[in-house]
Image (spheres, rainbow, N blue to C red):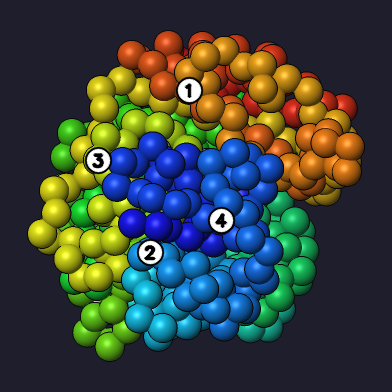
């Protein structure tokens, strides 16, 4: 089966790398891609936010499966356009992708489905925001209702900072109660009816060591989580993932694709922090490094309503760790055009996943975004995987490079 991956970030490179190792995959294509994706797929120029352009490309390539990576094309209706051409597409419809496209909508669905989550106030005026902050108290959790590339959330003890973030949001603002406890990511593969969970992962959102600094799109991740409750996956599937999929089907907007549940393991039990409608980044990197099942079979089954008929996802023993190398100024800004060296000189068994890279006319690999590379390694334990990942990080350099030194430390 020939496959087309839509997107050009680290998540798409990780998915494409797993697909390239899948014996059921024939020709692998990516659009628009990046220099890392170019090593495993044929790249095609396309506006990923133009549903008709993506559908035209998929039809011209006669692929058997389209995999839409980022959230913005899903919200724009790319999966709808591809499916309308009779081509199986992994990713929810625009209507179902509202679970990520609108946090207020996600809260509405969770309330209807009885899914445990943080109490929330949806605000449309500054006065409503102030009242909500007074009601919840510090620490304040303020979220942009719409898409914000993983950086639309502020958690702060400073009321003025919370108000400033709310004022900078593009539309409605969601003010939530603070959830204590560690956060966990659990992904569910869905075909509109059936849910098949992957194994949990944990990412590190803060920019600096010790979970200090501003929120980012993610500075690293690891899996599995040997400290998590043994029944976590079963509980979340039963109380979060399946009820949400059932509620979306009841509404006539079935969810097919990847349902990402960001969870807090609080003193009062599991609570949903957020939903995403696609694979998370950088958790995808560690999960794909450990996945033992053929990825194409799982994704195609989701796209064609056959998930109940294929074997549940299985994972290799051991662990995986990914460490993100970010550019100067991230997350407030990013630096582009800095020459990257050493990306092809990492130790054997270490994957260098490209997230924000480009090549110059002279063939140099350069930075082209905030999160530049995700250095990923698997090992027999978290400690072994961590050591290998950081050995890969040590081989790579570019001006202004920054990374956390404590990803998966002490686990």
Image point (62%, 69%), residue name: 48
Q: Is residue 213 above or below residue 309?
A: above
**Between discs 3 and 4, the one toward the N terminus:** 4
Q: Which SS class for mark 4? A: strand
**Between discs 1 and 4, the one toward the N terminus:** 4
The residue lying toward the viewer, choosing from 292 and 371, is 292
Which mark is in front, 1 or 3?
A: 3
Contact flag, marks 2 and 3 (Cβ < 8 Å) = no
Specify whether 287 is left or right of 210: left
The residue lying toward the viewer, choosing from 9 and 358, is 358
Give percent across and percent down for residue 337. Answer: 88, 41
Q: Is residue 277 above or below residue 150?
A: below
Residue 65: mark:
2
- From the image, tell me which residue sits under label 4: 30
**Label 1, label 3: how many angstroms apart (C-alpha)?**
18 Å
Q: Quadrant of the C terminus?
A: top left
Contact flag, marks 1 and 3 (Cβ < 8 Å) = no
Q: Which SS class for mark 3? A: loop
**Label 4, label 2: how many angstroms apart (C-alpha)?**
12 Å
Q: Quadrant of the N terminus?
A: bottom left
Q: Which SS class for mark 2? A: strand
**Between discs 1 and 3, the one toward the N terminus:** 3
Image point (59%, 64%), residue name: 143
Which mark is in front, 2 or 3?
A: 2
- From the image, tell me which residue sits under label 3: 293
- From the image, tell me which residue sits under label 1: 377
Residue 12: mark:
none
**Label 1, label 4: how many angstroms apart (C-alpha)?**
23 Å
């Amino acid at each position: 089966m020939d496959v087309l991956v839509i997107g050009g970030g680290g998540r798409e490179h990780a998915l494409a790398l797993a697909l390239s190792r899948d014996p059921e995959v024939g020709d692998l294509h990516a659009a628009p891609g990046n220099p890392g994706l170019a090593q495993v797929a044929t790249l095609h120029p396309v506006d990923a936010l133009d549903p008709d352009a993506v559908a035209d490309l998929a039809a011209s390539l006669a692929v058997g499966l389209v995999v839409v990576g980022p959230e913005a094309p899903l919200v724009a209706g790319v999966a709808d356009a591809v499916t309308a051409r009779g081509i199986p597409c992994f990713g929810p419809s625009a209507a179902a992708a509202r679970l990520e496209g609108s946090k207020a909508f996600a809260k509405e669905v969770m309330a209807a489905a009885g899914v445990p989550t943080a109490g929330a106030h949806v605000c449309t005026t500054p006065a409503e925001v102030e009242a909500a902050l007074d009601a919840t108290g510090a620490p304040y959790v303020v979220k942009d209702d719409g898409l914000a590339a993983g950086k639309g959330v502020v958690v702060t003890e400073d009321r003025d900072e919370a108000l400033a973030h709310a004022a900078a949001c593009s539309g409605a603002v969601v003010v939530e109660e603070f959830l204590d406890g560690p956060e966990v990511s659990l992904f569910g593969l869905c075909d509109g009816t059936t849910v098949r969970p992957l194994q949990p992962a944990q990412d590190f959102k803060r920019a600096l060591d010790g979970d200090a600094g501003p929120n980012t799109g993610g500075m690293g991740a690891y899996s599995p989580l040997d400290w998590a409750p043994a029944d976590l996956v079963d509980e979340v599937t039963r109380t979060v993932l399946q009820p949400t999929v059932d509620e979306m089907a009841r509404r006539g907007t079935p969810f097919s694709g990847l349902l990402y549940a960001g969870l807090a393991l609080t003193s009062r039990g599991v609570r949903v922090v957020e939903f995403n409608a696609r694979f998370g980044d950088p958790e995808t990197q560690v999960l794909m490094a450990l996945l033992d099942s053929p990825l194409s079979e799982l994704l195609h089954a989701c796209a064609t309503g056959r998930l109940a008929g294929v074997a549940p996802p299985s994972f290799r023993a051991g662990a995986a760790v990914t460490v993100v190398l970010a550019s100067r100024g991230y997350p407030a800004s990013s630096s582009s055009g800095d020459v990257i060296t050493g990306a092809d000189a990492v130790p054997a068994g270490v994957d260098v996943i490209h997230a924000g890279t480009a090549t110059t006319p002279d063939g140099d690999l350069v930075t082209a975004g905030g999160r530049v590379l995700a250095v990923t390694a698997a090992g027999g334990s978290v400690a072994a995987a961590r050591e290998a990942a950081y050995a890969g990080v040590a081989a790579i350099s570019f001006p202004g490079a920054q990374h956390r030194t404590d990803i998966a430390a002490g686990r």
